[in-house]
């Protein structure tokens, strides 16, 4: 338990303290990064650049295409025992109907619904969580919501705190901002916290469903092992570089904005490696990539629905991403979806840490 607390304290200190320390050293006014609710626009984002766009696109393809190719090449259909048939639970059916109703209300502007129009995000995603757990229950006879209700409920407050970290880091790069909402500080805090609380349950529920499909394990559980000859040295180096980069994220937001998505993952995995613990990449040493693939795919799947349902909602977010802010799918620039890949791994890491706390 002491190790888990130490990891969290180091993570929180680095994520909260280093970006603020950087802007202090740069002589920037600290008050604008602590404004709440955040309204001011003070980051001047770089215009679109074909060179940078092409570079990012090639890097993403360089990482993703070989993995997809290896998955297809390695996939061999296996004969497995059919899953027993289970009825789709009543609460899953309820989630379907409430989700459809909320979707309609989110994308329309009925006069009688004006007071509640900005608050459709949470019921829409609560419906999604019911449906995705219902699918898992139907396919396997169990799901997180009914099989581990205490842990399932724990994910909601944990998710809220988890996403507030990203909101804080966004203060230094301002890659997204919210429109259509005008709340006081306390109203903003409570409504935002309620919305943020649905993130982890949605992604982890989706991951659980994806793990029930046979194509993931045959394709990605027998790949070439990935081993590091001196993993602790690499972890220490990554931790130092991540710390230095976080210090500069508010000073050079146009160049370091991607750290918003990757720095929490680098810090946690580096600390776990230095402490001799297993982490989300540990099984890759034996060629088992399915835990990584399922978490990444789940976040990308949820990301599609986040962006789609956001598009016509009254209370919504919009993006301002330097160099690549073009070719949008809904509000998100197409290359921005790459951010969901490390985010899925971070969700899985936080879930794993929570399970370790409960066991201890």
Image (cartoon, helix red, strand yellow):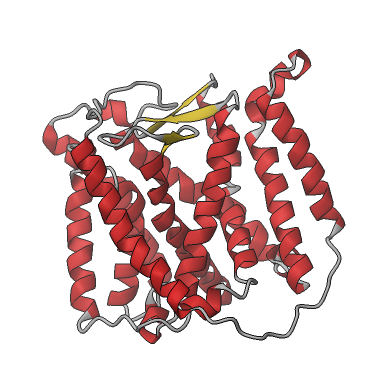
Q: Quadrant of the C terminus?
A: bottom right
Quarter of the view holding residue 125: top right
Tell me which residue sits at (57%, 26%) in the image.
315
Front residue (pair 277, 335): 335
Left or right, 163 with respect to 15, comes to right
Question: Looking at the picture, how far across and down is residue 303, in whole percent?
Answer: 52, 47
Tell me which residue sits at (18%, 29%) in the image.
28
Seen in the picture, residue 27 relative to 52 is either above or below; the reply is: above
Asked whether the viewer can see residue 2, the reply is no
Left or right, 16 with respect to 105, comes to left
Q: Quadrant of the N terminus?
A: bottom left
Quarter of the view holding residue 280: bottom left
Question: Looking at the picture, how far across and down is residue 228, in whole percent?
Answer: 24, 81
Seen in the picture, residue 91 relative to 305 is either above or below; the reply is: below
Tell me which residue sits at (69%, 56%) in the image.
132
Front residue (pair 8, 278): 278
Question: Looking at the picture, how far across and down is residue 62, in whole percent?
Answer: 28, 60
Left or right, 48 with respect to 161, comes to left
């Amino acid at each position: 338990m002491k190790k888990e607390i130490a990891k969290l304290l180091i993570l929180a200190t680095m994520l909260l303290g280093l970006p603020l320390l950087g802007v202090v050293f740069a002589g920037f006014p600290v008050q604008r990064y602590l404004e709440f609710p955040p309204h001011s626009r003070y980051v001047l984002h770089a215009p679109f650049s074909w060179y940078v766009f092409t570079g990012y696109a090639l890097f993403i393809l360089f990482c993703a295409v070989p993995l997809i190719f290896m998955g297809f090449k390695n996939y061999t259909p296996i004969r497995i025992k059919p899953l027993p048939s289970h009825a789709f639970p009543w609460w899953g059916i309820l989630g379907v109907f409430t989700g459809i109703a909320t979707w309609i209300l989110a994308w329309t502007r009925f006069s009688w619904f004006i007071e509640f129009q900005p608050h459709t995000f949470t019921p829409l995603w609560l419906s999604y969580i019911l449906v995705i757990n219902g699918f898992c229950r139907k396919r396997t006879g169990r799901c997180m919501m009914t099989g581990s209700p205490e842990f399932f409920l724990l994910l909601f407050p944990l998710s809220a705190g988890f996403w507030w970290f990203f909101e804080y880091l966004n203060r230094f790069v301002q890659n997204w901002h919210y429109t259509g909402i005008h709340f006081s500080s306390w109203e903003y805090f409570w409504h935002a916290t309620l919305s943020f609380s649905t993130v982890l349950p949605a992604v982890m529920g989706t991951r659980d469903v994806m793990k029930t499909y046979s194509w993931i394990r045959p394709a990605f559980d027998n790949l070439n092992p990935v081993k590091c000859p001196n993993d602790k040295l690499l972890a220490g180096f990554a931790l130092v570089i991540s710390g230095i980069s976080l210090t500069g994220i508010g000073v050079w937001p146009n160049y370091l904005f991607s750290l918003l998505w990757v720095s929490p993952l680098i810090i946690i995995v580096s600390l776990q490696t230095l402490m001799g613990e297993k982490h989300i990449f540990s099984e890759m040493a034996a060629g088992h990539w399915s835990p990584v693939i399922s978490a990444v795919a789940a976040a990308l799947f949820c990301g599609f629905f986040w962006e789609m349902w956001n598009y016509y909602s009254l209370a919504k977010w919009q993006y301002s991403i330097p160099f690549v802010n073009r070719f949008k799918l809904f509000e998100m620039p197409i290359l921005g979806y790459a951010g969901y890949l490390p985010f899925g791994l971070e969700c899985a890491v936080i879930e794993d840490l929570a399970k370790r706390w409960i066991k201890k």
